[in-house]
Image (cartoon, rainbow, N blue to C red):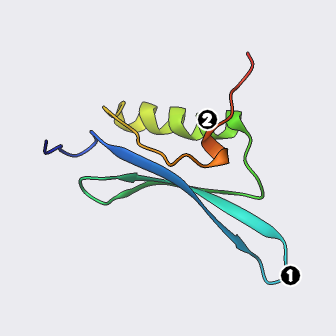
């Protein structure tokens, strides 16, 4: 199945350290069809609600994707309490 722009987004985290050793992470959301970086959100660490906020902002801007595949890493294995 061939998808078009804004139909399939992929999400993952990139981790690194600053020159002084402090860690940081970047939440990356990419359109799988166009390879456009839709969101690059840097933080020292991420909580579930911060990932949700980044996704909500992107949906308000571009609309909802049909699918958003993620890996099975611990970052996406949690849940939020309302």
> Looking at the image, which residue is at 65% across and 46% down?
75
Crowding at dot 2, Cα within 10 Å, few <14 / some 14-19 / many 20+, comes out as few
Labels 1 & 2 near each other (Cβ < 8 A) = no
> Looking at the image, which residue is at 28% across and 42% down?
6
Q: Position of residue 57 (x, y in %)?
A: 52, 36
Question: Which type of secondary structure does the marked residue at label 1 adopt?
Answer: loop
Q: Residue furthest left?
A: 2
Q: Quadrant of residue 50 in the image? A: top right
Q: Nearer the viewer, residue 42 or 25?
A: 25
Question: Which type of secondary structure does the marked residue at label 2 adopt?
Answer: helix
Q: Residue furthest top?
A: 82
Q: What residue is shown with label 2? A: 53
Crowding at dot 1, Cα within 10 Å, few <14 / some 14-19 / many 20+, comes out as few
- Up the image or down, 60 lies above or below 6; here it is above
Q: Position of residue 5 (x, y in %)?
A: 22, 46
Earlier sequence position, callout 1 versus callout 2: 1
Q: Position of residue 68 (x, y in %)?
A: 40, 39
Q: Residue furthest front?
A: 72
Q: Position of residue 34 (x, y in %)?
A: 25, 57
> Looking at the image, which residue is at 13% across and 41% down?
1
Q: Nearer the viewer, residue 62 or 70?
A: 70
Q: Find residue 20 and name its label.
A: 1
């Amino acid at each position: 199945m061939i998808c078009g722009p804004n139909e399939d987004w992929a999400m993952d985290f990139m981790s690194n350290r600053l020159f002084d050793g402090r860690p940081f992470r970047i939440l990356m959301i990419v359109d799988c069809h166009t390879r456009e970086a839709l969101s690059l959100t840097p933080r020292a660490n991420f909580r579930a609600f911060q990932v949700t906020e980044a996704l909500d902002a992107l949906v308000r801007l571009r609309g909802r994707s049909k699918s958003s595949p993620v890996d099975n890493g611990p970052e996406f294995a949690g849940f939020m309490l309302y």
